[in-house]
Amino acid sequence: SGSGHVANAARSALLPNVYLLWGKRPDLKLGFSVNVPFGMGTDYDEDFVGRYHALKSDLSMIDFAPSVAWRINPQWSVGAAFVVRKADAQLTNAVFVGTDAHASMKADAWGYGYRLGVIYQPTETLRFGLAHHARISVKLKGDVDFTGTSLLPDGGVSTNLDLPATTSLGVSADLSPTVSLHGEIARTDWSSFSQLRIKFATGMPDSVTEERWRDTWFCALGLAWKATDAWTFRTGVAHDQGATKDAYRTPRIPDCERTWVSVGAGYAFSQRFSVDGAYTHLFMADGPLRLTGAPPDQSRGALTGTYKNCINILSVQARYVF
């Protein structure tokens, strides 16, 4: 029973990013970044027909990364970063124990990894870049609270979360002194996310959600035009494969294939200070929901439907040279 229509299960999010760069020597740079690599959030009303699968899902991450880059010669440059990742998760859902009870889990963890990159510039107008972001595994630990029932004990919980590696290849070509073309292709090893298994310190059976995500490809093409000394205009398109297989899509992360369309502009107030802004719209394919209620979903029930998604991204960046 419950509502089978959800007007908007997604939540808006503010994603901050900060990058600092020091030029110790012309061929040696030191950096530090704070950015958000992954994240997701959905929130359904308490009477949602799929409430035994999910109500609120909130997974947020922040990476802190000191880095170093070295220009070996005019053609080759290399870089590396050490990544410290903070992960926080909150998952809630209804539990049927003769009547509806409520389960809420909160957990966090720290993880560690690295990034590597190399740039090859055969000519003054052509550059190639190869980057690898290593897989990071975190063990989330926290607590679960049950309300509306005395049959289920509160206590500690834990789950292992493997966050994927990404390898990307980029190219930048100056077509003229004012126009440049940019491209990228990237592969993300999402197959590392095969299931969400929550273990209970109280001895309750594990809560298991089959995910069985697949590796994905991302490809993008962009164009930049420096109209004046102050103004630069940009546009681009991209296609991003969905990691979720139709048979395993869940209300927590209803991922789908998507096509990106972006426009943006930058204005340089001086040689030291500039501001950029952009708007991106993601057109997303419809996502069928086909959960049969077979194990391990027997306690959650069958759930069918269709997700119709889209995403809007507004971004602004300011850069200041000391």
Image (cartoon, rainbow, N blue to C red):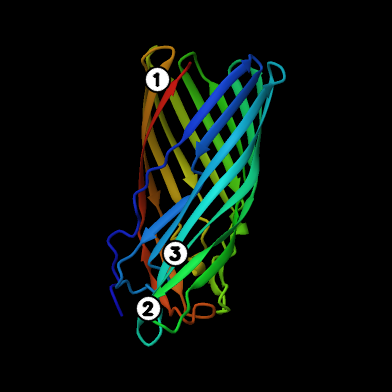
**Which residue appears farthest toward the right when viewing the image?**
72
Q: Position of residue 7 (x, y in %)?
A: 27, 61
Label 2 sits on residue: 101
In this view, the residue in front, 46 or 227, is 46
Label 1 sits on residue: 274
In the rendered image, the vertical position of residue 299 relative to residue 185, given as above or below: below
Mark 1 or mark 3: whose residue is earlier in sequence: 3
Q: Nearer the viewer, mark 1 or mark 3?
A: 3
Q: Is residue 196 visible?
A: no
Per the image, label 1 sits on a secondary structure element best described as strand
**Which residue appears farthest toward the bottom when viewing the image?**
98
User: Is the C-beta separation of discs 3 and 2 under 8 Å?
Assistant: no
Q: Quadrant of residue 118?
A: top right
Left or right: residue 77 compared with residue 148: right
Between the C-alphas of marks 3 and 2, the distance is: 14 Å
Label 3 sits on residue: 91
Q: Mark 3 belongs to which amino acid? A: Leu
Q: Mark 2 belongs to which amino acid? A: Ala
Quadrant in which the N terminus is drawn: bottom left
In the rendered image, the vertical position of residue 80 relative to residue 205, given as above or below: above
Mark 3 or mark 2: whose residue is earlier in sequence: 3
Q: Residue at x 50, y 26 (%)?
A: 181
Q: Quadrant of residue 266?
A: top left
Q: Quadrant of residue 75?
A: top right
